[in-house]
Image (cartoon, grey):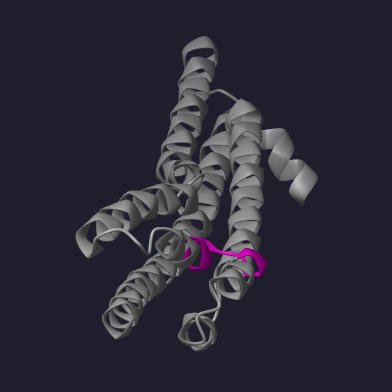
Amino acid sequence: MLPELLHHGGLMIWLLLLAGAVAVAVFVERLLHYHREQINSIEFITGVRNVLKRDNVVEAVSICDATPGPVSRLVKLAILNRDRERDRVREVLADASLLEVSRLEEKLTLLGTIAQIAPILGLLGTVLGFIEVFRVLQQQGVSAPAGLLAGGVWQALVCTGAGLAVAAPAYAAYNYLVSRVNRIVIDMEKATTEILNLLGDLQQGA
């Protein structure tokens, strides 16, 4: 069945298959990346807090280095800038957060674009299919054999279906990955607030 669909789909079906393959590759790569980047921020911050309360900055930085993800990188940055004023540390963390969010959102635009253009590519294939139908009608007249007309109709239907088949999962995958990014960003914001408060308490207690 699949070889027959590929045969009748024309050029557009191959473009749609390529777009689908790229979407799958992006989704898997981003999913694995987010799995590595997202940590238990509460447990991490608790560990860092306990170490910093013992005034062991070196161990706290080592914990950050050993922990993957933007949360640990922001906490490490805050620790390294702990001697600065609170507002200045907040500015440094805000700039670093923008960079981390940009890294998290990398390639998501590509997935979203595929979700948007797949139906358009399918529609273009459909139009090309019907152009072929009318070309045959123009050459053969209304008495054209059904077999000659079937090729264009096949292409139109196959491309429409393929466009929707690529777009729907790509759009769902995009929204899922965006939700993962949002959860990591929330963890980053919570961790930033926690480490700023912790450093402030330690400075007051010093």
Residue drawn at point x = 56 percent, y = 23 percent:
144
Q: As rendered, which of 71 and 175 lies closer to the eye? A: 71
Give the main secondary structure, helix, strand or loop, of the magenta stretch.
helix
Classify residue 67 as left or right of residue 138.
right
Residue 20, percent from left and from top: 61, 46
170, above or below 31, in the image: above
The correct choice, above or below, for 66 with respect to 30 in the image is below
Q: Could you say which quadrant of the image residue 151 lies in? A: top right
Along the line of sight, the residue nearer the viewer: 64 or 138:
64
Which residue is at a point 31% across and 72% down the rendered structure image? 196
Spot occupied by residue 200 in the image (x, y as percentages of width and height): 28, 76
At x 63% / y 66%, what residue is drawn?
A: 36
Verify whether residue 48 appears in magenta.
no
Q: Is residue 130 left or right of residue 154?
A: left
> In the image as oriented, which residue stretches furthest toward the front?
206
The residue at the point 34 percent across, 75 percent down is: 199
Query: Magenta residues, as a range?
Result: 65-73
